[in-house]
Amino acid sequence: MENEKAVEVKGLSILIKERFLVQDVSFSLKQGDVLGIIGSDGSGKTSLIKALVNMLPISDGSIAICGKNIEEHPEILNQVGICLDPPVFFKFQSMIDNMIYLCSLSGHNSKKEIVSTLKKFHLTEKMRKKVYTLSYYERKLMALALAFINEQKILILDEPFKSLPVASVKRIQGYIQELRENGVTIIMTAKEYDSLEDQCDYYMFMKNRKVVEYLDRKQCEKYSTTKTYAFVEVKYPHFCGNMVAKNFELKVKLFDKRILFEADEDTTADVVRFLTANKLSVYSAGYISTKSERIFAKLTPYFKER
């Protein structure tokens, strides 16, 4: 069906040993949509993409690919390509032997096409090298080449641009755009919004294994251009936030270990001196700078005394 959803996730939770890896996540994507999942380490983004390909057990909710539930129809996952970070291969085998074997698992065993894809990723000079001799950068490109080689309807890329030089990033962005124009649905993860800026139709921000917000590109632009916040990073953010709000009459937000507030440099310095004088450890202070931080800060509710 033309209007069939390529990916549909409803109320997804993953609970392992009484600990949520993902909690109550829902979203859907049409054919050709590109989604960016943004979050720091431990936010749940990698667990989420692993669940999408049945690498983690679903505790609650459901995942459908091209209209078929992945638990009831696991064969539908043949339509999904995934590149996880860090990349893992048979380290004592050569690059080309790894590629031939791994491609054969999905019924794809054309050596000519494999070599052609490695050439596209500028890896042909390394294809006879054993994996353990390759750099992280080369193994990353190898993992991306493996994900791109088959003609899947859905492509999942875990931090695809991490540690890659600018030239490689630009080249891969071009390949992603080609796939998008051919109707491939793409999901990418990143720690920072900035690395996926202008690459996605939608952005899902995750924190503490939950979705904080789901925004389209225009909404992200609106959030990212708002006023930045001064911050003080402390050991006890709730206690310190309460003290700052009372003693400086500032509207305070709590963001991880940071106290956020709108203030100039003098006021920020006064806050640091005040906390230090009260024997409260201050790890760092400054201004939120990246667009990802500004979006997360905007989404964070103002502090309320408990």
Image (cartoon, rainbow, N blue to C red):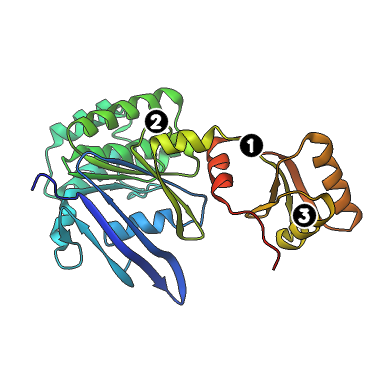
Going 24% across and 56% down the picture, which residue do you hit? 8
Q: Quadrant of residue 239?
A: bottom right
What residue did someone put label 1 on? 228
Q: Earlier in the sequence, mark 1 or mark 2?
A: 2
Front label number (3 vs 2): 3
The reply to whether residue 137 is in sight is: no
Q: Amino acid at mark 3?
A: Ala
Q: How many marks?
A: 3
Going 51% across and 38% down the picture, which residue do you hit? 223
Residue 195 x, y percent position in the rendering: 46, 34
Q: Nearer the viewer, residue 71 or 102?
A: 71
Please determine whether, in this image, residue 160 is positioned above or below residue 59.
above
Residue 290 x, y percent position in the rendering: 57, 35
* Residue, far left: 1
What residue did someone put label 2 on? 198
Q: Nearer the viewer, residue 239 or 226?
A: 226
What residue did someone put label 3 on? 245
The CA span between labels 1 and 3 is: 18 Å
